[in-house]
Amino acid sequence: MSSTVHLSLGFSFHQRCSSFFQQSVAMALSLVHSTLFSKTSQLFLHTKTGFSHFSSSIPFSSSALPSNPKTWRRPVISALELGGVKIARDDVVRDDPTNNVPDTIFSKLGLQLHRRDQHPLGILKNTIYDYFDTNYSNKFDKFDELCPIVSVKQNFDDVLVPADHVSRSYNDTYYVDSQTVLRCHTSAHQAELLRKGHTHFLVTGDVYRRDSIDSTHYPVFHQMEGFRVFSPDEWEASGVDGTSFAAEDLKKCLEGLATHLFALEDKSIRLLYVDSVKISGAVEMRWVDTYFPFTNPSFELEIYFQEKWLEVLGCGVTEQEILKRNGKLNNVAWAFGLGLERLAMVLFDIPDIRLFWSNDERFTSQFSKGQLGIKFKTFSKYPPCYKDMSFWINESFTENNLCEVVRGIAGDLVEEVSLIDNFTNKKGMTSHCYRIAYRSMERSLTDEEINGLQMSVREQVQSKLNVVLR
Ligand code: FA5
Ligand code: MG
């Protein structure tokens, strides 16, 4: 795992190792909100008219705007339309202790990269659609415009996420208010679609998580949910029980999808088992057993990429309770949630997740509708610049809060935040040293600019996280 602390809807390292955090959600909440989110209300001009901002918003926070005026446009959006509903900035970003959505996140709402046919995410979504249409005779209903602002019930309760699960915390999820969140996974729509009678569906959309910073984690990314319900006659003849039948069908479906995607670029797939030796040539992937509250058994699919195993999707056989509650008693089902960016990074050779948000023509012009085989040619040869920062942490310190501060200042100019040293002294005080890598994907940064950013980071880390710099 690259930086060890990232939210997963399953059990992550984070969950196993930060019980102090679970116990202090309430404390963190008040601390986070009293200190972390002072809102920059001048960022967006307010207009009540509202409009979609597919093309006019930009992916930088104001504090991270590049100095070259040609490479950016100032955001002028105060409202947008999501699934036919008008949403004003004030509906999502509020100075209120139950709200932790910063402007940088609001600026991403409604961009809908997955609905752009020339964008790698749109190209990938369409290719996955083709696979399902061809192999399942158009049986899968497709949704890609469901509103990302959902209730806590939809996001967590409906998929059986326990009341004390770490993913519900303000440290991991963006809350609009105590009962409303920016969905942190597309599984938030499973229950409502089942209730509406859908038995085969794909839901694609933007999802939001407070998370660590590195080349494969971003606070906004895109998932595609797949869901398939079986009726008893489908598995009874097979001689195996419903759960085994569904699990086998699920793996077959996803292995078939992987073969379809990589075959388009003339690559073969090699399925490995945990601890297998890597052999170069083919795309190598493996199934790993895992845990999700909503499936049992549960699996993750990993692909070998940039010298590491990269988790690209989670899946499993749906818990009976979900089916029962939503009118599908006596059925079994499988579900998967695929991280579109991660898969697109492997397919298009995109080295950093920030690039998906780039409006730079040198990025956007490399992709065209329907063309999956294209390999991205990097245009950024700029070296990263590293800055280290040590401080004594306090009880409520979390890496996600640190990352939120750093992103708030440096925006997409920050490439990675990693813990490089960690010790506790005789007095029981714990020191962390973080290394921040600054690098623009699009231009070279001046020393002056980086020093300015680092100075602000140091100030805000101290004032907002109440840590003591060393
Ligand atoms: C889920 O979100 C589950 N809802 C998936 C699921 C659906 C399981 C249906 C079972 C049945 P997870 O937290 O592991 O699981 O995220 C799914 C995928 O999203 C990951 O495999 C990864 O590809 C992607 N992902 C997770 N966090 C990030 C991030 N910060 N940036 C980019 N991609 C991410
Ligand atoms: Mg996971």
Image (spheres, rainbow, N blue to C red):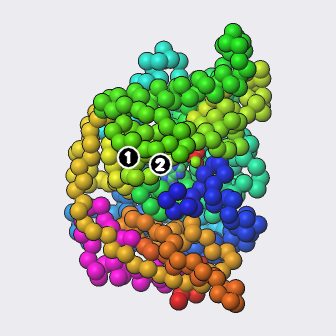
Observer-side mark, 1 or 2, equals 2
Give the residue type at disc 2. Answer: Leu
**Compared to 35, does 85 lie above or below?**
above
Measured in 3D between alpha carbons, the distance from the residue under mark 1 to the one under mark 2, in whole angstroms, is 10 Å
Residue 92, image x and y in percent? 56, 57
Residue placed at 73% from the left, 65% from the top? Answer: 19
Residue placed at 47% from the left, 81% from the top? Answer: 389
Residue placed at 36% from the left, 82% from the top? Answer: 452
Estimate how packed mark 1 is, as few (under 14), some (14 to 19) or many (20 or more) residues with alpha carbons within 10 Å. Answer: many
Badges 1 and 2: C-beta atoms under 8 Å apart?
A: yes
For residue 456: magenta?
yes
Residue 162 image label: none
Residue placed at 35% from the left, 42% from the top? Answer: 280
Residue behind label 2 places its C-beta within 8 angstroms of ligand 1: yes
Query: In the figure, residue 43 lies in which quadrant?
Result: bottom left
Left or right: 452, with 147 as reference point: left
Of mark 1 and mark 2, the one earlier in the sequence is 2
In this figure, which residue is indicated by the disc labeled 1?
Answer: 345
Query: In the figure, residue 427 lies in which quadrant?
Result: bottom right
Estimate how packed mark 2 is, as few (under 14), some (14 to 19) or many (20 or more) residues with alpha carbons within 10 Å. Answer: many
Magenta stretch: give its range: 437-464
Front in this rendered view, residue 302 or 150 = 302
